[in-house]
Image (cartoon, coloured by chain):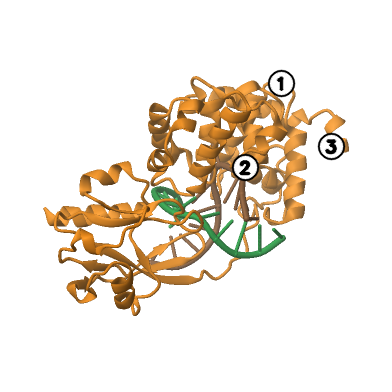
Chain colours: A orange, B green, C brown
Amino acid sequence: MTAQGSFAPDETFAAPLLAWYDDHGRKDLPWQRDRSAYRVWLSEVMLQQTQVRTVIPYFERFVAALPDLRTLAEAPQDRVLALWSGLGYYSRARNLHRTAQICVAEHGAELPRDVEALSALPGIGRSTAAAILAQTWGERHAILDGNVRRVLARWHGLRGWPGETATQRELWRLAERHTPHERVADYTQAIMDLGATLCVRSRPHCLRCPVAPGCVALRDGLTAQLPARKPTREKPTRATTMLIVRDAQRRTLLERRPPTGVWAGLWSLPETDDAAGASRRLLDRYAVRVDDGVALARFVHTFSHYHLEIAPLLLERAVPLDRVADAPDRAWYGPDELESLGLPAPVRKLLQTLNEEVR
DNA sequence: CAACCGTGGGC
DNA sequence: TGCCCAAGGTT
């Protein structure tokens, strides 16, 4: 604990922010109704690096299917990944599932009401643990997400890039200092709402901002420069070939991807290292003839950190089932079965397009 | 600690 | 269009 922890919080920031929140804050989000620890936890994990608008339909569908922690713990992982399919960062789904099982086994089927125990669970870091305790129980814990980072970097005129350790540490210190002792749940929601609606990245609405008096960036004309941008880095390009193998009933051969790396644990098209070696590898692994196939145009899928060039190789001729090698994580799926699978969004779209063309 | 992990949207 | 970013966490 730092010395600042014993000081009174600086409420010259929190007081006008809370007053603004009463009139303009968001209070109707799905996870704000029926505010259980389970629903708050689920929403906080879904909202990691993901915008509110995107999360809402996924949240509704997820809690309808798996309404409580024990139900989630007992669900098969395939079901959890299917409900997550399209949302991205799939380790969140696997960690969510694991954490539910740990809570059932070790915490009486509840989320622990304790920062240390929460942070020790898979997928729950410092900020998510703080948000759960603040939103569920009103306990005083500071959060630090993208919104809070932007608001505090501007208000205090912090020039450093938030990714740097020193800047990060300073932001946490300021976040704790501004957090009031009363109305903590409202305050954490208020500072996020401020960042999401007024103190936005480009063209912030400073005329309507309740904490504009005292904002260093506004005073110094730096709102467009803060927070400092991440240093640019060249994105690598990776190439791969995915095989679209279909049998006489127009079912597609799918494989579960390994538990680490891109699209971990999801069902996807079988993958080969390179198009040149595809022929030999096909013969080895699937016992099909590559000259039955038709190569499609290469397309590029862009991830956050690299471009993935995918050259799908479509084998249109019928492939007898008994000529495909047996494997536990390999199976044929018809068009109607795809919905129940955890599929990467680009693969889901590609298969949908192919199935529509057949009709 | 820096790289990694997805997808959709804004400009 | 290409690039940056979004209610971060893990390795």
Using the image, tell me which numbered label, if any, was put on residue A182: 1
Instruction: Respond whether the residues carrying marks 2 and 3 are from the same subunit.
Output: yes
> Can you identify the residue that label 2 sits on?
A145
Q: Amino acid at mark 1?
A: Glu
Look at the numbered discs 2 and 3 and tell me whether their residues touch, using CB distance below 8 Å: no
Rendering coords of residue A239 (x, y %): 41, 72
Determine the residue positioned at 63% across, 38% down: A121
The residue identified by callout 3 is A1
Q: Tell me where residue A231 sits by quadrant.
A: bottom right
* Residue A209 in sight from this viewpoint: no
Q: Nearer the viewer, residue A141 or A209?
A: A141
How far apart are the alpha carbons under marks 1 and 2?
Answer: 21 Å
Q: Which residue type carries mark 2?
A: Asp
* Residue A12 in the image: above or below residue A48: above
Q: Residue at x 46, y 53 (%)?
A: A264
Which of pointers 2 and 3 indicates the residue nearer the eye? 3
Q: Is residue A126 left or right of residue B7?
A: right
Whole-percent x, y for residue A53 in the image: 43, 39
On residue A212, the disc is none
